[in-house]
Amino acid sequence: MASHPLTLESTWPASTINGIPSVVHGILDLTCEPDGSVSLSISVGAVGAAPEDCEYTEFVLSPQQADTLAAILASRGPQDSR
């Protein structure tokens, strides 16, 4: 995995808990750390929302977990891409 961050950004239709339609914008940042661990940072909010109005979650995968994730993703064939 590259040592520079990989950023995936997407907008999709969603609904609130009460079923009110909305559009959600999300960003997934993947960063490989020098020790082999991988940081996954996810931010989700309304399109154009200020950073303080978004929700943030971060996961740090150990080098072994990162290797497992890489193997799973590498095993996906072109027919699996969406």
Image: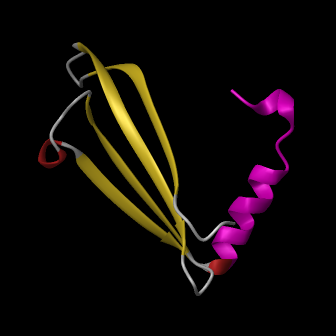
Q: In which quarter of the image is the N terminus?
A: bottom right
Find residue 12 and report its horizontal and vertical position in percent: 42, 22
Name the residue nearer the viewer: 16 or 67.
67
Find residue 31 and report its horizontal and vertical position in percent: 52, 66
Name the residue nearer the viewer: 72 or 4.
4
Image side of residue 50 versus residue 23, left or right? left
Image side of residue 62 versus residue 80, left or right? left
Question: What residue is drawn where x is 57% and y is 78%?
Answer: 37
Q: Quadrant of the C terminus?
A: top right
Q: Quadrant of residue 26?
A: top left
Query: For residue 73: magenta?
Result: yes
Image side of residue 45 versus residue 13, left or right? left
How many discs mark residues in the rendered view? 0
Vertical relation: 30 (above or below) 28:
below
Question: What residue is drawn where x is 32% and y is 27%?
Answer: 24
Vertical relation: 6 (above or below) 67:
above
Query: For residue 6: magenta?
Result: no
Q: In which quarter of the image is residue 17?
A: top left
The magenta segment = 64-82
Q: State how the image is colored.
A: secondary structure
Find residue 51 and report its horizontal and vertical position in percent: 18, 47
Question: What residue is drawn where x is 84% and y is 27%?
Answer: 79
Find residue 59 and report its horizontal and vertical position in percent: 44, 65
Question: What residue is drawn where x is 34% and y is 31%?
Answer: 25
**What's the magenta bit mostly, secondary-structure-wise?**
helix
Q: Residue furthest bottom?
A: 35
Name the residue nearer the viewer: 18 or 58.
58
